[in-house]
Image: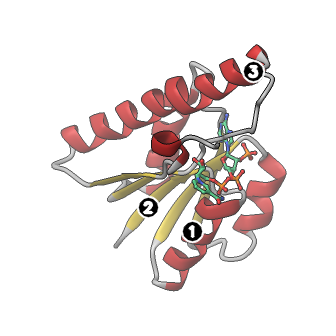
């Protein structure tokens, strides 16, 4: 059985990847902050989907990711797609720091937890979605 966890599957790229994996027969565990959006998605294929709301910027997100892995019965593939990005020409510091909390602190928290799981369970695939903006900027 192929089991994937996707963080950031309530919209966008993470949700589209989740739909593709469902079509290929994967069992998936999906996460994001919005519980109603997770429940809506789960209704597509309840027998194939486990859900867990979490906020990657919060300290309890690691524990919640481990809970989701347990609900799914294990994890073969981990995908992080919960990045955010804003045009911020005024360099509003709240926007900058919130982005860093999500894309740096949250990224580190989730990837460390996933890596640790794979280390203890003989391996797995770890994938993240970043952005070309990270290397070229946004103009
Ligand atoms: N779309 C593009 O054209 C594009 C281009 C290049 C790179 N990317 C990158 O691809 C990734 C995904 O982009 P997207 O366009 O699919 O974005 P999106 O539609 O805004 O989706 C972001 C997902 O992340 C979740 N999320 C955001 N903050 C979170 C938090 N604090 N804790 C947990 N989940 C959180 C959101 O769920 P909730 O709101 O439910 O929490 C949502 O499911 C990002 O890293 C982005 O930089 C996108």
Residue for point 66% across, 32% down:
55
Element at label 3: loop
Residue behind mark 2: 4
Q: Are marks 3 and 1 in contact (CB under 8 Å)?
A: no
Q: Earlier in the sequence, mark 3 or mark 2?
A: 2
Q: Which percent across, then down, holds residue 32?
A: 67, 45
Residue 24's x, y, as percent? 46, 84
Residue denoted by label 3:
91
Residue at 52% across, 46% down: 68
State if disc 2 and disc 3 touch (CB < 8 Å).
no
Q: Is 29 drawn above or below residue 25 in the view shown?
A: above
Q: Residues within 10 Å of mark 2 (few under 14, many from 20)?
A: many
Q: Work out whether mark 1 precedes mark 2 in sequence or the reverse, and give the earlier one.
A: 2
Residue 95 is left or right of residue 79, and the answer is: right
Image mark for residue 18: 1
Q: Estimate the spatial distance between the alpha carbons at disc 3 and disc 2, rounded to whole Å.
A: 37 Å
User: Earlier along the polypeptide chain: callout 3 or callout 1?
Assistant: 1
Quarter of the image with the C terminus in it: top right
Residue located 61% across and 63% down the image: 13
Tell which of 104 and 91 is nearer to you. Answer: 91
Circle 2 sits in a helix, a strand or a loop, which is it?
strand
Query: Image quadrant for the N terminus?
Result: bottom left
Q: How far apart in space, not on screen, are marks 3 and 1 (Cα)? A: 34 Å
Q: Position of residue 49 (x, y in %)?
A: 59, 65
Report the mark closest to the observer, 1 or 2. Answer: 1
Tell me whether circle 1 and circle 2 mark residues in contact (CB < 8 Å): yes
Q: CA distance from mark 1 to mark 2?
A: 9 Å
Give the camera-side residue of 10 and 74.
10
- The residue under the point 21% across, 46% down is 121
The residue sitting at the top extreme is 93
Circle 3 residues within 10 Å: few <14, some 14–19, many ≥20: few
């Amino acid at each position: 059985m192929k089991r994937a966890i996707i963080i950031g599957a309530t919209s966008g790229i993470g949700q589209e990847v989740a739909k593709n994996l469902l079509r290929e027969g994967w069992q998936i565990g999906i996460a994001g902050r919005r519980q109603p959006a997770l429940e809506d998605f789960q209704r597509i294929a309840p027998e194939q989907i486990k859900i867990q709301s979490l906020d990657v910027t919060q300290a309890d997100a690691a524990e919640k990711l481990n809970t989701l892995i347990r609900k799914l019965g294990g994890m073969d593939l981990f995908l992080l797609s919960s990045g955010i990005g804003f045009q911020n020409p005024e360099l509003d510091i709240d926007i900058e720091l919130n982005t860093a909390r999500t894309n740096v602190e949250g990224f580190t928290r989730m990837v460390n937890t996933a890596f640790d799981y794979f280390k203890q369970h003989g391996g797995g695939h770890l994938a993240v979605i970043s952005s070309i903006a990270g290397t070229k900027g946004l103009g």
